Every structure is written in structure tokens, then in C-alpha cells.
Image (cartoon, coloured by chain):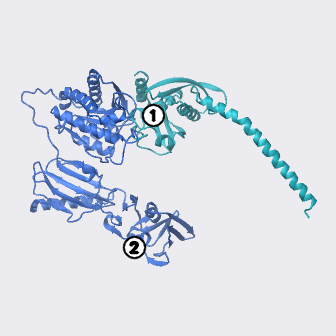
Chain colours: A cyan, B blue
Amino acid sequence: MIPRHLLIGVTIMFLVALTMGFYLWRMRKRVAPLEAAAVTASSGPAQIAPPASGPTEQATLFVAYDDSGVLRQQAVRIPLPSGRQQRAQELLRSLISVYADKPSPHSIAPGSEIRQVYLVDPGLAVIDLNGAFASGHHSGILIEELSVVSMIETLSMNIPGINQVKILVDGKERDALAGHADLSGVYDVSQVNQLADLFQNP
Amino acid sequence: MRWNNRPSLAISLVSILTLAAATLLLSAPSGERRISIYSAAANYSLPVLVRNGVDYVGLLEILEPLGSVSSKLNGQRWKMRYNNIEGEFDAGSSRARLHGSYVDLPSPFLLEEDHGLIPVSSLSNLLPLFLGGPVTFHESARRVFVGDVAVHFTAQMSDAAPSTLVMNFSSPVNPKIATETGKLHMTFTHVPVVASGTPTLAFNDKTISSASFLEANGAAEITIAGKEPLFASFSNDGRTITIAAAPRTPPPQPAQVIPPAPPVASGSAAPHGPHFYFAVIDAAHGGEERGAALSDTVAEKDVTLAFARRLRQELDGRGLKSMLLRDGDTTLSLDQRANLANTAHAGIYICVHADSEGAGVRLYTALLPAGGENRGPFLDWDTAQASSMAQSESSKTGLAAVLQARQISVRSLVAPLRPLNNILIPALAIELVPPAAGVSGFGSPEYQQRIAGAIAEGLYGMRAQLETR
């Protein structure tokens, strides 16, 4: 003979489980149209998702275009923190989000990220890319160079006082981005500015 | 090793002195002490620590590339495991327990920040027990050979003129090459090169006098002594190294008017000696380094080599002697390429690359990194190209004009592309992009002839400026 209180307890728990299952089913039905809308939106014109919340500011990204092998300036409004180093990171993350969009003007590997940007006085910026960025990057002189120049120009245009840039991968020095663009040295921003002019006025 | 020229006493004495000097240099305490381990799984080099005058090395660091390792510290007792073999070591004790048996160490085991250090001289006893196979230890040179991995070589003087020393290795090699007056040094750090016979050979030859083998500090070195500047070239997929006198250009024709050389800027160490070649052609990538995957079946390294050969043919056809830095599927580091190009004393360096996207041809000069500073007569390696940048730019402009005149789409750019910045002479990179037929069209003789012919024509037009540097 099953005690009465045990029978009541099991019945209540069974009803709770049924209610939660129904609630979960309703929630999934509500989310499905939102997911579909998000997929549709991402396949439309390139949009820059704000990486951080807060008031937005205007910034200039130097966006590489693989089909024509050029750089184009693109004005965007994005939330930027007040600290220089945090601003530098958000700027590059915005640039990477442009490249990660579909269709992308400059294809990069899935999972490509900016791990960190360090601003070292006087005037040295260190960009730390993640391994996926380098290992999955398309190999070629021009396309690797476009990646490097677009990042350096985006930083130097928006963060005053950067004269030199060093690029690391996973916190370590690397010979080249994907077999061509040299990462072993330090980039002189004034020289890269001249290079960017070449890419903007081919 | 074998040789087929009769040695003379004087040459033998010179060789012995050379060997002694090299021994002193290699064993000098100026550099870090290292030990090299060669095995079928990996070839690697580790630092050696000196404690109480005895050489020590980390046991886990030695075994880690060869299998699964773990360790645990319990007071002064250090337990470690390699695959299924357990070892127990006590700090300060000269006795260890390995797989249930005791082993005596020539010096006490040391513990430093949880790292177990064993005397280097104990490796010949310990490693066979861990690895379960034969281990050959060249203790004085600190070189450990696990199993039958040694790379042997033969060295033979060629009877034909000009004198050449042909060295054939049983596996591909990729030594670091350094030259000095009358000597060429090849250092093998990650290749288990061993000498099969006598370590010094003397040749009764007017160009190459001796070859000596020496191993020390975890590396092997072959030194070729000669009476002229020597030059090494690779072939047979890196299995053959041919040493010969660096060629010289013939004297100028009496009718040829040579403008005076431009004044040399202070601190410039650009080579102004005789030109051995008109052009050095460098087929980018090669060997283990495939470059870009241009398609599922076409690798950049193969396209660059085919085109480099075609360009050499086109230049030779115009009477411009050129040299390929690699004429096979050989691995060459960027530093090696720069060294070879800088010692060839050529008029121009041309590096060939290929891409799968775009149209026509792209020409690049070097984007020099920041911070280069020459010190007296020594040029900064990263900005060595600085003194030749003006000529590199004018060569790029000249070539672009010729390509455009032939209806070939061309784009002139600057790129952070090594080794352009390490080259002392005018230096360009050419990036080929596929013809209308796509990547498969790279192999088309018509495509190669069209582009290579135009470039050779452009270089021919600039020969006066390039040959008189």
C-alpha cells in the first residue's frame, strides 16, 4: 500500500513537469521567428553590430575589398569606451565584424578574433590576433597585406599618437600572417599610411 | 666520405689547423650550451644547464617530444612516467629507480622548481631503458641519435672543369650556410648528419683545398676551405649540395662604355664587387613549405618553380646569366635565400610568387620595417634593402612599363614581404595571378612564355643600370 502523502507528492511533481514542458515548447515557438529574422538580416547589406553598449561615436574603418584589391574608408557609428586601449580594441573588433559578415568584402576565417590590443608608450600599438585568424587566412601577398594595412590604418586614423604597430598571433611573434605578409618586424605607421594611399588610389 | 685527389702534406696541415680553429670556435663558451636529440618522431634541441661544473638537462623535456610524459613531486621524491615506464628520482641522490630496477647516475639528480634534472652523461644509460631501443650518444658533441636515424654523406671532387665538390646526403638537408674569405661553413642543427669516415679530406685542387666535419654543442658543421670565394647550390630535393667557386663575370668588351659607379654613401655596404650573375631568381616557398593552395591540386611552390625556370631560360636566351636559388622541391629559409642572393653579387634579385585571385601581374618592392639602424660597416639585417630601394623602384617602374606595352595588366605595389628587405641589391617580387583559363592555366607554356618573355625583355632593357652597380 503506497502512503497517501507520497502519492500526492508524486502527482504534484508530475504536474509541475508537464507545465514546464508546455512552457518550454511555447518559448521555442516564440524564438523560432526571431532566429529566422536574424539569419535574413545577416545575409542583407553589411551591418556593424555594436560590440559594446553605450552612446555611439563616429569612427572611420579602413575596409579591404578583395575583388578590386583596394582599401575604402567607411564611416560608422559604434559605442566606444573612453580608455584608449579599449577604444583600440573595439575599433578593430568592429573592423573584424565587417569582414565576418556575409557577404564579406574581405574574407577571413571563421572564428577570427582580435584577442587584445596593447598601447605601449611611446606610440607603439601591439595587436594580438587569435590563431584562427592567421591559420585560416587566405594565403597571398596582396590579400594578407590588405588585412595588415586595414588594421593598422583603422587604429592610427582613430587613435592619435600611434607611430608603430607590432602584430602578434596568440600572444607570440610569428614570421608571417599566412606565408607572405611579414609579422616579424614592427610596422612604421607613416610608411603604412603611404601604402594605404596606394591601395585607396590604385 | 671518399675523395679522388691526392692530398699533399701542406694541404693536410692547413686542414688540421682549420679543424683545430673550428673546434675552438664551436666549443667557445660564448654561446648557449645545447644538446640535440634526433629520432624518427622529431629532431629537437634543448638548453644544457651547468650545475657544479656538470652538464644537466631536464628529463621530461628530453622525453616529451617522443611520447606521453607526466610527473609528480612528493617531498624530495620526483616520480615521473614516460608512456608505461615509471621512474623515481630523489633530489641529491645518485641512484634512481626505473621500472623497478635501480640505475646509478654519474652525478646527483637535481630538482629545480619541480623540474627534474639529470646529468647529460647519464643519457646513454637512461634513454635506452625508457625508449626500449638503441640510442647512440655522441657525448662530447652532445648529440643523441635514437634508433637508426643518422644521415650519411659522401663528398667527391668532380674531375671536370670548373672544380666542384659534390656532396650527396642520404636524406634532404637544410644547413645554415655562412661564408668568409676562402671558407664556406654549413651548420646542421636539426639534421642528424654524421661522418662515415675520416673527418677531414684534403683535395689536390687549385680551387677547393679541403673539407672537414666537426660536431660540437649539439650541431654538426662541414667546413669547405678554398682559395677562392665558394658558393653552395642545392639540388635533388635537398639531398645534393654542390660547392664551386663563385663565378665571375667576363671582363667588359673594349667597345662597351661603362659609366662610373655612383658614389657610395657612408655606411653603405652594398656589394660593389664583380657581378657573378645578372639576376638571382627565387622561386618562393618549396619543400615542406607549400605556399598558397591555389587549387585542390596546385600548390604555389610548384607554380613559382616552373615560372622561375622559364624566366631563367628567357634571360639566358638574351645572354643574361641568371641563377635559381632552388631548382627543385627544396626547403630554403628566408634567411638562407637572402644570404645566397647577397653573396651571388648579382645585378637584381627577383622573387616569384603566385596567387589564385586577380588579374595580370603584381610587382612589389620592399616595405621596410621600422627601427633599422646601421652600425658602422654593419648593415641592419631587416633594412638591408634601404641602400638599393631607389634602384628597386626604378626597376619596378621599368618592368611595369614593358608589361603594359605588351597588354599585360600590371599593378605596382609595396609589400612587407621577406626576404625583399634583407636583400642588398635591387629586389623585386613578382606575383602571378591566373590567366583567363584559371589556376590550371599557370602551367600553360604560352602563359609562362608571355609573362616571362616580357619580364626578361624589361630586364634586358635595364641591364646597363643593373650591371654597373
A119 in relation to B161, above or below: above
Q: Tell me what residue is drawn at x 28 percent, y 24 percent.
A: B403
Is mark 1 in CB contact (under 8 Å) with mark 2?
A: no
B48 in relation to B420, above or below: below
How many other residues sit within 10 Å of disc 1, few (<14), some (14-19) or many (≥20)? many
Residue with the most extreme bottom position: B101
Helix or strand or loop: what does disc 1 sit on?
A: helix
Looking at the rendered image, the quarter that the N terminus of chain B falls into is bottom left
Number of marks drawn: 2
Query: Which label belongs to residue A119?
Result: none
B213 in relation to A61, above or below: below
The residue type indicated by label 2 comes to: Asn
Residue with the most extreme left position: B254
Do we see residue B376 in this rendering? no
Looking at the rendered image, the quarter that the C terminus of chain B falls into is top left
Residue B312: horizontal and vertical position, in percent?
Answer: 22, 37
Along the viewing direction, whichever of A68 and B202 lies nearer the viewer: A68
- A94 sits left or right of B191 in the view: right
The residue type indicated by label 1 comes to: Val
Do we see residue A147 in this rendering? yes
Which chain does the residue under circle 1 lie in? A
Q: For residue B131, what is the image quadrant?
A: bottom left
Residue B457: horizontal and vertical position, in percent?
Answer: 21, 27
* Disc 1 target residue: A148
Residue A108: horizontal and vertical position, in percent?
Answer: 50, 36
* Disc 2 target residue: B125
Which chain does the residue under circle 2 lie in? B
Residue A103: horizontal and vertical position, in percent?
Answer: 53, 30
Q: For residue A70, what is the image quadrant?
A: top left
